[in-house]
Amino acid sequence: MDLNSAETSADNFDKQTDAELFRLMSVGQPSALGIIYNRYGSLVYRLALRILSNPQEAEDLTQEIFLNLWNRGAYNPNRGSMSSFLTTMTRSRAIDKLRSRSTNLKFLQRWSQMMATEIPPLTPFESASLSDRSHCVRDALAQLSEKQRQVLEMAYYEGLSQSEIATKLSIPLGTIKTWSRQGLLNLRKNLQNLIG
């Protein structure tokens, strides 16, 4: 096989549809995975980085997503596009990683998912209700002690684990865990009318 025919073969792969590349990949053609990665690797990485806010974790997750595609071949071209499949898998795995960072922050994660869910344009009533709930959450956070609020904000907004918070604040891990638990319990109590 000469160099020109190898280039032509690579060009042919580049021109194939995602479904055709997936079929080739399924029969063990690694160059097909390479082209799929070239097409969607940056999309997967950017989404992972946006959710995880950590470049190393985003890189690891990107590799995990494409290895999973190669090993399991769970994609079905009849059910949707490759980009939709990869973004759904990336979002799901990234959220799983966020949840595994700290089991003590499950309440905040559920709340953030509920608030971050893409929804159609709000009606005036829904907008007023959302504004009211946001105000209630801000008030509930303001009612926490400064220490509890700081720990919860660092975990939620900065994505830090309790160990990382303890290191950053130079406070024993047990104290951080106590503040976090008390803060979550107080936050739940303060938001009980919204939750129940």
Image (cartoon, rainbow, N blue to C red):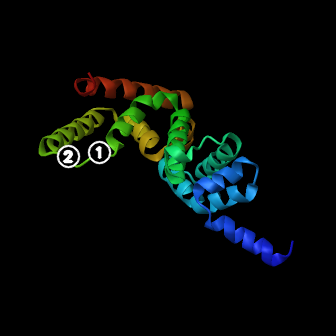
Disc marking residue 119:
1
Question: Residue 99's x, y, as percent?
Answer: 51, 34
Q: Which residue is mark 2?
A: 122
- Please name whichever residue, 140 or 175, is drawn nearer the observer in this view of the structure: 140
Q: Who's the residue at 69% across and 46% down the image?
A: 70
Question: Residue 56's x, y, as percent?
Answer: 62, 52
Residue 181 lies, with reference to residue 114, above or below; the image says above
Check disc 1: other Cα within 10 Å, few if <14, some if 14-19, many if 20+: few
Res 36 quadrant in image = bottom right
Q: Who's the residue at 59% across and 62% down the image?
A: 39
Q: Secondary structure at mark 1?
A: loop
Q: Is residue 170 visible?
A: no
Q: Who's the residue at 32% across and 28% down the image?
A: 187
Name the side, left or right, on which 27 lies relative to 132: right
Res 35 quadrant in image = bottom right
Could you tell me the amino acid type at mark 2?
Leu
Q: Do callouts 2 and 1 mark residues in contact (Cβ within 8 Å)?
A: yes
Residue 178 lies, with reference to residue 19, above or below; the image says above
| Distance (Cα) linking label 2 and label 1 | 8 Å
Q: Secondary structure at mark 2?
A: loop
Question: Residue 89's x, y, as percent?
Answer: 54, 43
